[in-house]
């Protein structure tokens, strides 16, 4: 409850400051770049240093990657189905449906795909899911969060954001791979993993932790600033499909597959809950960094967060 209250406050504050022009119009871009290049890498570095990754637990990361790819597949299929609707625009209701839900330009498609795949496993996930999972499977939750942030948000997410954010189709694949190699979060993970045996000066760890505590409020401030750019309800309409994929379709399909594979109930519940977390605020950060559709990124975060309390009891009933 505290996490939700804090997120609502920071989001509202960001929207208020930006709409009232108390802060410069360029501030969201600056904040997004600070989070991308400094805040999130420090968060991953601290989490990696504190996590017990010495055990040979390879299964949760593999399943996390599989769920990410499943989300990518669902996003692609959804885009193709929505694109098919544009062929029947002569019918009035089909035209209205197509105009409301089909992302027509590359920047909007990029935000659509990212919102369907990337979840808020770090803040909301690690705050909520441990309350429903036994102690034996808490490490699964942590590994899911680490893998999702590293491989998903700042691996696959950067690749897709770079791909859709290119202004020209020339060398778009080369540019996307180049951007992945420059992702600061990947280097932060490597530094955190290999620096675990190091003894750090006593005041450094609390200092890093204090900086990390500013990342989440800063991200929600950014979301609020992006939401203040919304014009009417058009972006909220566009957020319905990716938000539904992220909070409903993806977790239920993941749960069905994991059930068929015969995993224990506790493991299945941990994976389903983490896969159903709302769209990540990494979407807002990537939208700023790679010039994607910012209002759509922000509105999917809000809409999917609103949907979470509605679907959470369903997952507990079906997969506990």
Image: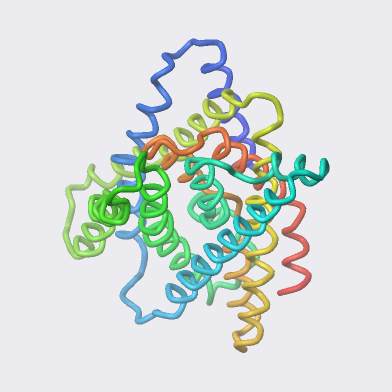
Colouring method of the image = rainbow
> Is residue 54 in sight in this rendering?
yes
Figure check: 292 above or below 112: above
Figure check: 227 above or below 186: above
Q: Name the quarter where the N terminus is drawn.
A: top right
- Between residues 186 and 125, which one lies in front from this camera angle? 186
Q: Quadrant of residue 25?
A: top left
- Between residues 162 and 306, which one lies in front from this camera angle? 162
Q: Is residue 71 left or right of residue 236?
A: left
Q: Residue at x 65, y 50 (%)?
A: 243
| Residue 90, x across and y down, in percent | 77, 44
Q: Is residue 269 left or right of residue 14?
A: right
Q: Residue at x 60, y 87 (%)?
A: 261
Q: Is residue 298 left or right of residue 84?
A: left
| Residue 201, x across and y down, in percent | 17, 48
Q: Residue at x 61, y 58 (%)?
A: 80
Q: Quadrant of residue 35?
A: top left
Outermost residue toward the bottom? 262
> Is residue 320 in sight in this rendering?
no
């Amino acid at each position: 409850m505290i996490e939700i209250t804090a997120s609502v406050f920071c989001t509202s504050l960001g929207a208020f400051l930006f709409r009232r022009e108390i802060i410069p119009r360029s501030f969201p871009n600056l904040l997004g770049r600070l989070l991308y290049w400094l805040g999130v890498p420090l968060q991953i570095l601290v989490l990696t240093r504190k996590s017990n990754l010495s055990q040979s637990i390879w299964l949760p990361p593999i399943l996390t990657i599989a769920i990410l790819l499943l989300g990518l597949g669902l996003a692609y299929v959804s885009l193709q189905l929505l694109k098919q609707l544009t062929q029947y625009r002569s019918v009035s209701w089909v035209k209205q449906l197509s105009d409301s839900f089909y992302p027509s330009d590359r920047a909007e498609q990029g935000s659509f795909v990212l919102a369907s795949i990337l979840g808020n496993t770090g803040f909301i996930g690690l705050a909520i899911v441990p309350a429903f999972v036994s102690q034996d499977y808490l490490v699964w939750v942590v590994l899911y969060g680490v893998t999702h942030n590293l491989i998903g948000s700042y691996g696959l997410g950067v690749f897709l954001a770079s791909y859709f954010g290119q202004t020209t189709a020339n060398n778009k694949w080369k540019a996307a791979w180049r951007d992945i190699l420059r992702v600061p979060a990947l280097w932060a993970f490597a530094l955190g993993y290999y620096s675990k045996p190091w003894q750090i000066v006593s005041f450094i760890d609390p200092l890093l932790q204090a900086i990390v505590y500013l990342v989440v409020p800063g991200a929600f401030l950014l979301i609020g600033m992006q939401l203040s750019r919304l014009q009417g309800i058009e972006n909220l309409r566009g957020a319905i499909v990716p938000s539904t994929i992220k909070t409903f379709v993806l977790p239920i399909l993941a749960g069905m597959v994991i059930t068929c594979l015969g995993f224990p109930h506790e493991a299945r519940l941990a994976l389903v809950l983490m896969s159903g977390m709302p769209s990540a605020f990494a979407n807002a950060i990537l939208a700023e960094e790679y010039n994607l559709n910012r209002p759509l990124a922000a509105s999917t975060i809000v809409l999917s967060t609103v949907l979470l309390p509605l679907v959470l009891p369903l997952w507990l009933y079906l997969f506990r």
